[in-house]
Amino acid sequence: MTSPAGSTRTEARQVRAEDAFDVEALAAWLGAHVGDESLGGIPAVRQFSGGASNLTYLLEYPEHDLILRRPPAGRRAEGAHDMAREYRVQTALGPVFDYAPATVALCEDPEILGAPFYLMERIDGIIPRKEFPPGLDLTSLQVGKLCVNVLNVLIDLHSIDPEAAGLSWMSKGPGYVARQVAGWSDRYRRAKTWNVGSFESVMSWLVANQPPDRGAVLIHNDFRLDNVVLDRADPTGPIGLLDWEMATIGDPLMDLGSALAYWVQQDDGPAFKAFRRQPTHVTGMLTRHEVVEYYCRRTGIGLTDREWAFYEVFGLFRLAVICQQIYYRYHHKQTTNPAFRFFGVAVILLERRCRKIIHRNK
């Protein structure tokens, strides 16, 4: 059942020219700021191609590896790609949440690599991408177990006391839902290009139908299977949760809605399956409706289908904004990554899906 493929090490590739940095400068900085003799010399550097936001690199040393995270080049949304914030969140989570990667060092001096960056330990395991890695043949019962175990990670995260974890500084107080609707609407309008829809009717519906906050918990804000690391010895068991860039304190159902925007299930149409990024379509995976039912049952939250429609539409809209912000960079030739070429098409499809859900819940 265990496969050598899918580890964060074997998925790394040659660094793209536009994302290259001065490795010798990095090595010098590490030597001066990190007291670890195993990090001596110049590391071999490779890049992970799976991410579409912050850039992630593998630093290979003879004794162990590190992961480096830094922002992309080009226009960035205000408040996005904050390396210091991401580093502080992961560092605070270490003692209270077993799935957060251990941090190593933070550099806020942009003169070293052209932008702030931080380093963390690599978690060795299997990361589910668009498909499970070759050789990882799970039965439908194992897939169902994996799915439930992953959802339990999200539920565990939502149960952490932010104040006890030293993360209450992330809270902006009541009104999280309203701030999110307004903030993501503003981001979309600023990133819009001529060849995508306006989303104005969707944004108006979100404003008119937004519910009050259903609590203020620690949320990941980018919870997907391809941000989860699975145990090699038991691939149904998660051992790590990656990419804490957008973590904050907010409404747990907003986090769930954002997670399910990526959840392409078995009976979805071919257009959405074309943009699938995780193996949520395989036999044994819970459907989106079953995920919501399981989450609400475990957390004791009462929720009707009509009430869930808001969180579902918001999650899809938020995903559309993320895609459009990335596509904006490609459209204006701030990146040449070919993976971003069709993100504008995804934005159009997501608007159609939002409208369909809204129409169904009039």
Image (cartoon, rainbow, N blue to C red):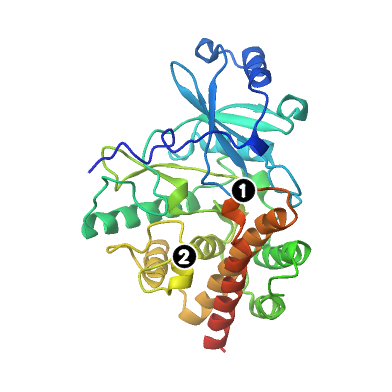
Q: Residue at x 57, y 46 (%)?
A: 162
> Which residue lies under the disc numbered 2?
274
Q: Residue at x 29, y 45 (%)?
A: 235
Position of residue 7 measured from the top left corner of the image (x, y, whole percent): 39, 37
User: As displayed, is residue 135 above or below residue 198?
Assistant: above
Tag 2's secondary structure? helix
Answer with the quarter of the image where residue 195 lies: bottom right
- Describe residue 50's horizontal placement relative to residue 282 as left or right: right
Q: Is residue 337 above or below residue 23?
A: below
Q: Quadrant of the C terminus?
A: bottom right
Badge 2: how crowded within 10 Å, few (<14), some, or many (20+)? few
Q: Quadrant of residue 295?
A: bottom left
Tell me the quarter of the picture where residue 266 sits: bottom left
Mark linked to residue 337: 1
CA distance for labels 1 and 2: 18 Å
**Residue at horizontal 61%, vertical 45%?**
245
Crowd class of label 1 (few under 14; some 14 to 19; many from 20; radius 10 Å): some
Question: Which residue type carries mark 2?
Answer: Ala
Q: Nearer the viewer, residue 198 or 90?
A: 198
- Asked if residue 232 can be seen in this view, the reply is yes
Q: Is residue 166 at all visible to an observer of this figure?
A: no
> In front here: 73 or 77?
73
